[in-house]
Amino acid sequence: ELKVEQNPLFLSMQEGKNYTIYCNYSTTSDRLYWYRQDPGKSLESLFVLLSNGAVKQEGRLMASLDTKARLSTLHITAAVHDLSATYFCATSRGPGTYKYIFGTGTRLKVLA
Amino acid sequence: KAGVTQTPRYLIKTRGQQVTLSCSPISGHRSVSWYQQTPGQGLQFLFEYFSETQRNKGNFPGRFSGRQFSNSRSEMNVSTLELGDSALYLCASSFLGGYQETQYFGPGTRLLVL
């Protein structure tokens, strides 16, 4: 059974600091997705990672994928308050399938 | 371009009733997926439709069903509601449903079962 684990579950950090969220998954997969969810809102797609070694960056967020280690990371650089949200990773197996398995989410709070 | 829309946004039902939720994908998108989000179970995949056919299904009881119309709009139905069905139901659309594509999520329907 495919499982996805994120850590930490909660993260409180000061503005200007760097931190990394980790996403481990249990079986072979070559695709990994990161989403952001603001309180009471829907999900917003951040990154789609489709191969081993893939790295994508958008603003203060950078995501990477290591399929051999079954690990993806979401690195936050010089955090700002606007990044406060819950971040989910997800993966799936098989072509053309959206049978995504989501991680538990990491609730990030950036303190001024 | 209009985003994914879901109706209704909020719904209160009682146990035993049934409910139908609607999702209109982004124009041109043919794949629609449904997810259930609860504090206890997190985000769980319900099913995916493409060109009016169910292509993938999650591990939910048969009380949960869905369909897709020729215009790609989708509905999901939950019969014989239980308290545990209280959740945020999200739908997401993409052009072809390929794994390399970005999914676009709607605002969700928040269902409360009393």
Image (spheres, coloured by chain):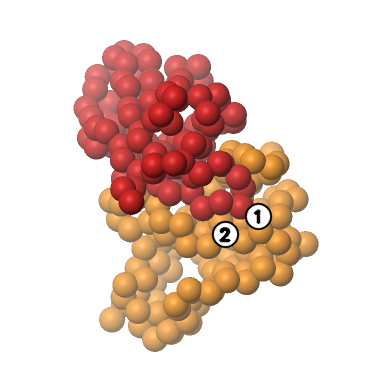
Chain colours: A orange, B red
Q: Is residue A81 above or below residue B98?
A: below
Q: Chain of mark 2?
A: A
Along the line of sight, which residue is nearer the eye, B86 or B95?
B95
**Residue at the far right in the pictured view:** A68
Q: Position of residue B14 (x, y in %)?
A: 24, 19
Along the line of sight, which residue is nearer the eye, B35 or A27?
B35
Q: Tell me whether the residue at label 1 lies in contact with that at label 2, contact meaning CB atoms closer than 8 angstroms.
A: yes
Q: Chain of mark 1?
A: A
Measuring 43% from the left and 31% from the top, which residue is drawn there?
A: B72
Q: Which residue is mark 1?
A: A31
Residue B84 visible from this viewpoint: no
Along the line of sight, which residue is nearer the eye, A80 or B106?
B106
Residue B45 visible from this viewpoint: yes
User: Residue flagged by tag 2: what amino acid is it?
Assistant: Val
| Label 1: how many Cα within 10 Å (few below 14, some 14–19, many 20+) | many
Q: Which residue is mark 2?
A: A48
Q: Position of residue B63 (x, y in %)?
A: 45, 17
Q: Quadrant of residue A69?
A: bottom right
User: Residue flagged by tag 1: what amino acid is it?
Assistant: Arg
> What is the C-alpha distance between the residues marked 1 and 2?
7 Å
Q: Is residue B62 above or below residue B76?
A: above
Q: Position of residue A26 (x, y in %)?
A: 70, 50
Q: Is residue B100 left or right of residue B11?
A: right
Q: Position of residue A54 (x, y in %)?
A: 67, 68
